[in-house]
């Protein structure tokens, strides 16, 4: 069998992002990660909602789905539960996942469903032309906040750790090598993987730019010595400083793996129930429970 390269995972559809968009890097890193893993494109499913980031599955080969705003995770859960043999990757953005879609995050994490979620965090709504998002800085200007937003930004890393994700990491769209490594690990991980990608929007977000991040990044694993990835408390402590650089010019944004632990996945637990009660018996119990009761 021929060895697949990153190009073999790209579709014939050309990306339509603005020049310089960080999402180009995410697309390239994903294709490289899939090539390093030699995944069968026919068994990789990319699912997205609505937004600039959510266009990404269009540019990959495979059975991909461009779904509704904030509903990519629910669609992906349906795919994975019905076909646990497939690799399902959710491509989403900070608005798609932490605004309209935020209600699904606790449940996909606490159930440890074996999905990979790649969130492209540009800290702005780009597709609808410059509204502030849940991760925008305090005071950030947008088309609907001409005097600056008064909202506090959410902390995606802290949220997903709290909800129970078993792999939580952050990477940067300007570092292809690091992104590829993190995305590859996330796909390999059995359980709910969440990767927050700092993905600059050069069109609308002039604050979180490539120039800014050039001197504002630190690798928590290589440079800060965070090597015990099972240490939940340490991961949370580091996550607390997710946006310190918004206020402190000397603080840096973190990249690297915060937390990684092996736990039974949702599919594992379903199989345990089947083995315990017997497959046929479990189906009959379900039928009995669902039967209409006589009044």
Image (spheres, grey):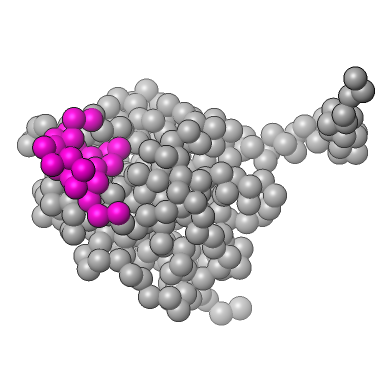
Residue at the top extreme, as displayed: 295
**Which quarter of the rendered picture does the N terminus lie within?**
bottom right
Which residue is depicted at the point 25% across and 55% down?
A: 129
Q: At which x and y percent is residue 71?
A: 51, 46
Taking depth in this image into account, of 132 and 36 the one nearest to the observer is 132
Decide which of 228, 35 is in the foreground and name it: 35
The reply to whether the magenta stretch includes residue 142 is yes
User: Which quadrant is home to the C terminus?
Assistant: top right
Is residue 133 toward the left or the right of residue 290 in the image? Answer: left
Q: Is residue 64 visible?
A: yes
* Residue 64: percent from left, percent from top: 54, 63
Indicate left or right for 233 with 218 as reference: right
Query: Is 277 placed left or right of 52 in the picture?
Result: right
Residue drawn at the location 83% of the way across and 31% of the way down: 290
As displayed, is residue 149 above or below residue 143? above
Is residue 260 shown to the viewer in this render? no
Find residue 110 and report its horizontal and vertical position in percent. 54, 30
The residue located at (46%, 45%) in the rendering is 70
Image quarter of residue 269:
top right
In the rendered image, the residue lying farthest to the left is 249
The percent position of residue 160, horizontal first and vertical second, equals 42, 33
User: Which image quadrant for residue 162?
Assistant: top left
- Magenta residues span 128-151
Which is more toward the observer, 257 or 75?
A: 75
Q: Is 56 placed above or below 209 here? A: below
Per the picture, the main secondary structure of the magenta-coloured stretch is loop
């Amino acid at each position: 069998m021929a060895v697949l390269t990153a190009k073999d995972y790209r579709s014939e559809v050309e990306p339509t992002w603005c020049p310089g968009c960080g999402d180009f890097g995410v697309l390239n890193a994903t294709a490289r990660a899939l090539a390093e893993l030699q995944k069968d494109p026919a068994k990789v499913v990319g699912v997205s909602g609505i937004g600039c980031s959510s266009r990404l599955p269009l540019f990959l080969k495979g059975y991909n789905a461009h779904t509704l705003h904030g509903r990519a995770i629910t669609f992906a859960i349906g795919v994975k539960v019905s076909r646990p043999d497939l690799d399902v990757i959710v491509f989403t953005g900070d608005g798609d996942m932490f605004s309209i879609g935020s209600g699904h995050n606790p449940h996909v994490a606490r159930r440890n469903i074996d999905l990979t979620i790649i969130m492209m965090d540009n800290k702005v709504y780009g597709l609808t032309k410059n509204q502030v998002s849940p991760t925008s800085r305090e005071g950030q200007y947008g088309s609907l906040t001409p005097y600056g937003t008064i909202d506090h930004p959410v902390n995606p890393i802290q949220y997903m750790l709290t909800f129970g994700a078993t792999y939580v990491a952050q990477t940067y769209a300007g570092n292809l090598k690091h992104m590829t490594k993190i995305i590859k690990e996330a796909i390999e991980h059995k359980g709910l993987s969440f990767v927050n990608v700092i993905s600059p929007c050069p069109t609308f977000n002039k604050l979180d730019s490539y120039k800014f991040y050039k001197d504002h990044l630190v690798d928590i694993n290589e440079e800060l010595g965070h090597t015990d990835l099972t240490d939940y408390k340490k991961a949370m402590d580091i996550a607390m400083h997710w946006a310190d650089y918004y206020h402190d010019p000397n603080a840096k944004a973190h990249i690297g793996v915060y937390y990684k632990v092996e736990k039974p996945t949702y599919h594992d637990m379903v199989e345990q129930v089947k083995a315990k009660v017997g497959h046929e018996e479990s189906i009959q119990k379900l039928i009995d429970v669902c039967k209409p009761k006589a009044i």
